[in-house]
Structures are given as C-alpha cells and as structure tokens.
Amino acid sequence: MRLQQIVKDERVPRSFDPREIISTWTEKDLLRGKVADAWVIIFRTRGCYWARASGCSMCGYVNDVAQEVSAADLMHQLDSVLARHAGQPLVKVYTSGNFFDDHEVPPDVRARILRELGDRCDKVIVETLSHMLRRDQLENAMSFVDALEVAFGLESTNERVLRHSVNKVWGLAEHARAAALCRELGATVKTYLLVKPAFLTEREAIEDAVASGHAADPHSDTISFNPVNVQGRTLVDRLFRRGEYRPPWLWSVVEVLERTRDLSAQVKSHPTGGGKARGAHNCGSCDRRAIDAIEEFSLGLRRDFGDLDCECRDVWRAYADVQEFMLTSADPLALIPD
Ligand code: SF4
Ligand SMILES: [Zn+2]
C-alpha cells in the first residue's frame, strides 16, 4: 500500500462543536530579542486540506478539527477569545491547518482576525503551507498588523525524507519562494524542521536536521526544530505501537542545536511532550534538566550545553551505533527483552 494511503487510513474523524476554539494559553517567547508573553490561540477550522487528502506521517492535528466550520462559526470563536487578551504583546494564531487557505479561513474572517489581534498585539504569527501563500493575501494581511511572521512547516530540505518519511510533496523551492515574498512585503519567516521523522535512525535524523537547518537558513529569520512527538492515529503512532519508532533523544536535540549555532537565523526548539515516552526523552532522571536547558537556549538565556551530562549519554551513543549495525530505524531497546 502506498504511504499516502496508509497515513490516511489511520485517521478517524470525530465531531466537535464548530463554534468553540480548540485551545488558548500563554507561553514565553522572544520579541525583539527580549523574553515576552506570547498568547497562543488555536482556532477550530475544517483543518488542513493536505491532512484531509492524505497528511503528514507525524500529524494528528486532523483529529482535532470539525467536519465543517462556517465563517459565522469562526467569527464566534474569535469573539469568544478576544475578551481573554491579558496584554500579551505577541500572539500566535494556529488553525491546525493553513491560515492562508481561503477554504479553511475565508478572506473576510482572516482580515477580521488580523485586525482585532493587530489592534491588541505588537506582533502576530500565523502558520501556513508555503505553496498556499499568495501575494494579494499577504499584502492584505500586512495592512492590519504592525509586524507579521509567517511560519512554514518545511520539516526537512531532503526531498527523499519529505516524500518517503514525512509524506509531504513541497520542499525547499516552495519555501524559498514564499520566504522571498514575505521578506519583500515586510513579514518575517519562521521555519519548522523536524527532528527524527519516521523511518530515520537516530544518527540519520540528527544529520538531516543539521543539514536542513543550514539549507533553510538563508530563507529563515527563525528556525524551530520540532522533535517528533507521537500523536494519536498517525503513521508514527502505528510504528511506535509496534516498537519500530522511538521519539528522538533529548541528546539528539542538543546536538542539533549545538551544530546549528552558526546559523544567521535565530535557532530554537520546544520539545512538545518532552520527557514523556511519546515525546523526546532521555533516561528519565536527566530529562527535566535537558528540557529546561533547551528552553533556556531557545529564549536566548544560555549559549551552550557544556554543563549538561548524564550517564545515559553513553547509552544514547550506543543506541545510535546499534541502529546502524542492525540496519534498522526500529527502537533497539523495545526489541530487546528485559
Ligand atoms: S503537519 Fe501541517 S501540512 Fe502536514 S498534515 Fe499536519 S497541518 Fe497539514
Ligand atoms: Zn540521563
């Protein structure tokens, strides 16, 4: 069976109230080089069109979307969340999809979201697939906000990884075009890259992330390395349940960050589900320290990881070596009985 069909078969649509947002919270991020409060709003939409057609192998967002969401529903979601603004200067608008997909976020809704949030916040961040971004949309968006950042899920710059592991058919060429458009019109660019997509060994994953970071650097103002976390009803989940996938070690994330410190873009990582079996993790006893260090690095509060160590670092090295020797990306620790 082709990868695209396997990914699609894992998905099970559920019903949700289309008038309710998925979630909102406040977290720390960088704004003009300083740590600031960032307001995160996840709108419930009909979701990413690519997830409906097939979808990325690690993405479970489609499980959170509603089957159909009207413009009136989205306006209601916006009204319900605006009252919860507590002075955060930065706002991140996510839709579990593409902010610049006119079918997902109709143009008049998009304009109102940007106007309302642009009135309240200094900077607005939105997310979209690179090939969906059109000049007229971005010109219009820029008229409502002081500062706009567009985030793109590039995931990797290696075409084979994109096609055979991530199940994405757009790559660096589309990203570079969209990034050039953003910069021409005054927006900044955030690039998401994966650490350890499906079927890659630990070592291949590190090398892929480091190489992708360097290749994407000229087309990025910020590069965020996303360690893959195992989301329910995805291809990665299916591999995980069979002992054929382990999320990346936090040591791998640390190595990627160390080896991309030379980039011009600001480099960061926020390991979702970090320290848990389904997120990037180490041995358990050093996970908290490693995650804190990665978060500090991402906020510009530390420059390196020289003070970080644990006995499991040797296990991590051995793990990566054994995978090469076994000629498999399966999780060696899950295959060896206690
Ligand atoms: S990762 Fe992004 S592009 Fe891929 S299916 Fe999920 S929302 Fe769509
Ligand atoms: Zn450890």
Image: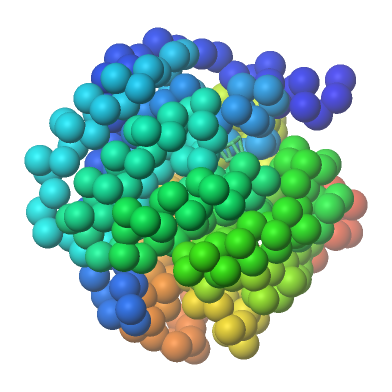
Residue 196 visible? The answer is no
Q: Nearer the viewer, residue 27 or 125?
A: 125
Query: Residue at horizontal 36%, vertical 46%?
Result: 93
Can you name the residue that lies furthest to the top here? 15
Q: Nearer the viewer, residue 202 or 84?
A: 84
Residue 261 lies in quadrant = bottom right
> Residue 298 location in percent, x, y?
42, 73
Q: Quadrant of the N terminus?
A: top right
Query: Residue at horizontal 48%, vertical 54%?
Result: 139
Q: Nearer the viewer, residue 142 or 290?
A: 142
Looking at the image, what colour scheme do you see? rainbow
Q: Considering only vertical position in the picture, is 275 above or below 269? A: above
Residue 117 visible? The answer is yes
Report the side of 95 relative to 129 (left or right).
left
Q: Quadrant of the C terminus?
A: top right
> Residue 171 location in percent, x, y?
75, 53
Counting every numbered tag in the picture gives 0
> Residue 300 location in percent, x, y?
38, 81
Q: Considering only vertical position in the picture, is 213 above or below 132? A: below
Query: Residue at horizontal 53%, vertical 73%?
Result: 221
Q: Considering only vertical position in the picture, is 42 above or below 210? A: above
Report the side of 269 relative to 184 (left or right).
left
Query: Residue at horizontal 24%, vertical 70%?
Result: 36
> Residue 50 location in percent, x, y?
64, 30
